[in-house]
Amino acid sequence: MTKQYPRIYSLSTVGLIHHREFDYLFHPFRTDFIGESGSGKSMIADLIQLIFVGSEAFESATRGTDIREPEGMVLQAEKRSKGVGYAFLNIEMAPAQYLVVGSYMETGNRSTQAFIVQAGYDWQHIQYLSAPVSFQQVLKEEDILPIDLLTEYLDEQGLHMKAWQRYKEFHKILFREKIVPLDLASSERLLNDYAGILQSFSRGKMLDTHKSDSLKQFLFGNQETRKILDNYKSAEKDMEQAIGEYGHNLQEIERVTSKQKALLDLRELKKQRDGQQHSWLYRNLLFYHQETTRLEKEVNDSIIQYTSALQHQSILKKLLTDEINRINERLPEMEWAQKTAEQEYEAILPRNSQVKQVLEWLAEFNCSYEELGSRYREYKRNRSEKAMLSPFLQALQLKGIANAFDKIPAKQSAAELNPYLSAAIAERQHQIQQKDRLKKYANINAPESLANWALQQKRVFTIEEESAILHFQDLPRKKPADLTDYLPEPAELILSLSVAEKTDNGFWITLNGIRKYIPYVTEQILDTTDEGKIRSYFEQYTNTLDKDVRELEKELGIYQTIQKTINAQDNISLVLSAYLRKDVLHQFLDIPSLNISEERFREYQELYLQKTAIQEQFTQAKSTKEQADRELRLAKANIGEYSTILEAMDTNSKPNNDIQLILDQFPHREPSPDTYSLEKENISASLSRAANKTDFFRQQVQLIQPALSGIQQLPSLKSSLDSNQTELEQAKDQYLKWYELLSESLEAEEYITEPKTEHNAYIVAEERFVAKYTSIIEQYIASEAYRFVDTKDFTELAKNLLPEAFYDVVVDQSEINVIDTIASYLTRINEKNRQLNNRKIQKIKNLLDEVDEIITQQENTIRRIDNFLKSDAQITGGYIARLRKTPAVNYPKTWMSTFKEMIEDEAGTLQNKLGEKIDLAEMMKTAFHNCGGPLHANTTVARLLDPSNYYELSFTMESESGRINKGSTGQTYAAVALLCIARLSIMSSEEGKAAAPAVRIMPIDEAEGLGSNYDMLYDIAQKYDYQLISLSIGPVGKFRDGEQYLYMLHKNMEVEEPVNYTPVAILCESDKMPNL
């Protein structure tokens, strides 16, 4: 495994920290440096980078504990004011042909000097050395010489050296000699990119592959962006005078436009004022002509209608009188018929009501007539039982024992209930006595308690003894007065207890021949001597007994209250019987009509059997009575109505003196006898056909009433007519004041309302015109306001507002010509600005063309890198690296093409919007937002002109199925290394062509953490002709004899200086050289 020529043969250090003076022989393919932290192993990669790129582009690949600037790598000299140091490479150009390239450093100076050592003097045609140079050839009697003295010293050895403070010529030679793959002298960006790749290989600058900006900066830097921004600034300076002129023109346009708009607004207001004035005067004339004509007709129509109505009223009065006389003749007969019908109705009404009541009962009970009797008797029984049960239920509720009583099973009769209650009371009393006896026993603190006695014995009792103690607890300890049993000494009984026989639940004892049965205790307590346990039990047992006694006393009270309530109740047997039916009785509803005696009920039943006859008699009597009532009532009502109508006609038919005076002024005809007779016949015929004569007469009166009452308005109509005739003459005079002739016809096609709205509109229009006129004067020519106090001349005002440049043009011109002149002047200024705006737009277009071109170049580079990555070796785990581009969300590239299309339309919206902006920056931002750029993007010119803003990059590791892996540290570094190789590959060769020979190194820091990915990098390095330099704390894999060199670095802890012991080298024997 060997890298092709050229390659690094060795690295020599002189006067540098950690390494001091040493020659590191490099294997043609792989060289490893191992050592603990702070031993200077990472400095190896830094020195190689420094030699190739120089101090200006150099940046340490790692963050070490010492200074990683070039001046910090030099050991401080003891005898000199400053230290100097060298690092140089022997580049093996071909077998036995070498060229030395190196870097000179000194303390206190951040800049380094590059140097080359060759065999000849011609620096255009390099002559290679036949043997490599060692650090020993640089030292002069153990001294390190400054670079100017070293040049002379090497000349003495036949080695020709040249140094450069500026690296451009040095880089040209390196590229020409195919030592570096790139022409680093061609651009600063290329140099920085190359340095960044070397740094990223060493994991020092650690490219953040998760950030798009970091990827873009690594791949392309910002040199092209700075160049475009420089062009933008140049364009700004070039357009500086034009932008000033543009701004001045905008101000002039704004000034003249403002005046033009003011005059246009004033002219419009004047037109509106004149139009409103004519509308008001003309409609005013039409209105009063219309009203005068209308009132003349109304006066004549009113008189004619009044005369006709008087004749109609006379006929109606005659017919009404005839009707009243006819009814009065028939009235006595109708009154006798009504009285007879009423007597017959009153006779049959009571029996019909009784039949109706029976029908209601049948419906209520939903039964037949035959079942009604039993339903009546059942109703009476239920009513009686409910009346008897209700007081009893109320008493139970009041005493709170209703639920307890309801739960008693034996309450069907008093004979059953009383024994039940007595037994329940006796049972509770017995249980209370038993509990009280147990309480005495359980009270271990009472001296008379046998439990107290037992506790004092401090021994265990058998179950028979404990049962006997409980059984005889009721016996007193002292002799009672009533000569009953007592137990003075419990010990005599318990200790001499004689058990004769046992059963499951108790036992028999012998008392001097008497056998007494004692039941066993349910739970034995005295089978222990633990006094605390016994006391705890009895205390808890006492609480339970107290609770049981309270519950029993409560139940006893309830049963006693029930017994007292029962005993206090009359007819308790009937009450209990009713109680059993309480649910039925609860549903019982009282029917007042059934609360009658049985005799009365039978009377109702008997009448019901005659139902049909009674109902027919009732229906006939009712019908006859209602008919007689109706006819009599109608006759009397008609007499009253007719009389009222007559009186009303007499009241409303006579005109007053004022009306009569007007009637006499207007000629009118009296109706002829023939007309009167004909009208009377028509009215009589209508009356005979009328279904209701009263309604007929009312309708006829209402028909003529408007004409009769309308005559009362005649004086008002006459007055209005006179007033409108006067207004008409005034309207004619007012119209002729402003206009020459009246219209030939003043008849309107539609009804004209009084023109108050038109008059108000005219007043408002006049006020607006005057206000605008005054406002213009105050705004533009306030000093000359006195000249326009008494005039509102539009043309004169316009002459004083126009700019001096074309004042003479508008003298004696009309309103239209004044406006046109201003418009022509504005057109000339706008045309100047349009031309200036086009120049600015062209500048922007040129800048965007540059941006678009750079974006295309960068996208092509990204494509080539991705093709390189996906076609090469996999990372462990079956993953391959991918570099993908996606459009930026906030900066769509399409806005630039849209901009170029839209600016072709000079009259388009975009041109107008850009014309509103003065400087290039605002124009560009406006163009961006109007050509597809999102409004929320707070953009700047720098962002718009930065090609990298128009796309996003993502660097991922993917499986064949497309699954993305975040990756381990080793996988991530392997992927980054691939990216570096890909970047350098496309930088140093054209697409489709093989890379030219050059020194290519792959420094791998912390290599032991890469795992199996190291083998992948091993293969990649071999494939792409790289030399591997591994930097790690411990060995990376097993040493491969003949395939690698290895140096072990150890810090010298015996001195204060940051130096190592002499490195331990493990080399391939066949590759050693005697002079190294």
Image: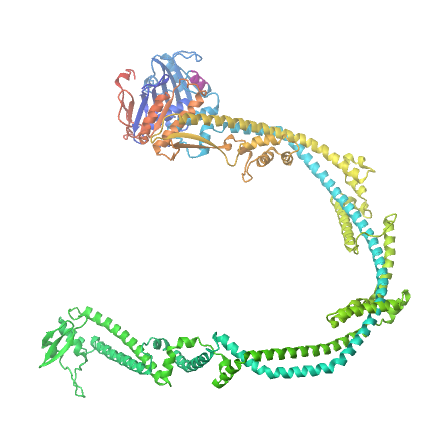
Asked if residue 203 shows in the view, the reply is no
Quarter-wise, where is residue 44 in the image? top left
Query: Considering depth in this image, is 855 or 419 the residue closer to the camera?
Result: 419
Pinpoint residue 662: horizontal percent, then vertical percent. 88, 67
| Residue 801 against residue 393 in the figure, above or below | above
Q: Which residues are magenta?
A: 169-176
Pinpoint residue 288: horizontal percent, then vertical percent. 84, 56
| Residue 807 against residue 49 in the figure, above or below | below
Query: Considering depth in this image, is 946 or 131 the residue closer to the camera?
Result: 946
Does residue 580 appear to the left or right of 1037 in the view shown?
Answer: right
Quarter-wise, where is residue 1003 in the image? top left
Question: Which quarter of the rendered picture does the C terminus lie within?
Answer: top left
Quarter-wise, where is residue 147 in the image? top left
Pinpoint residue 76: horizontal percent, then vertical percent. 36, 27
Pinpoint residue 274: horizontal percent, then vertical percent. 80, 47
174 is within the stretch colored magenta: yes
**Image point 49% across, 75% down: which residue?**
364
Q: How is the image coloured?
A: rainbow
Query: Considering depth in this image, is 829 or 761 the residue closer to the camera?
Result: 761
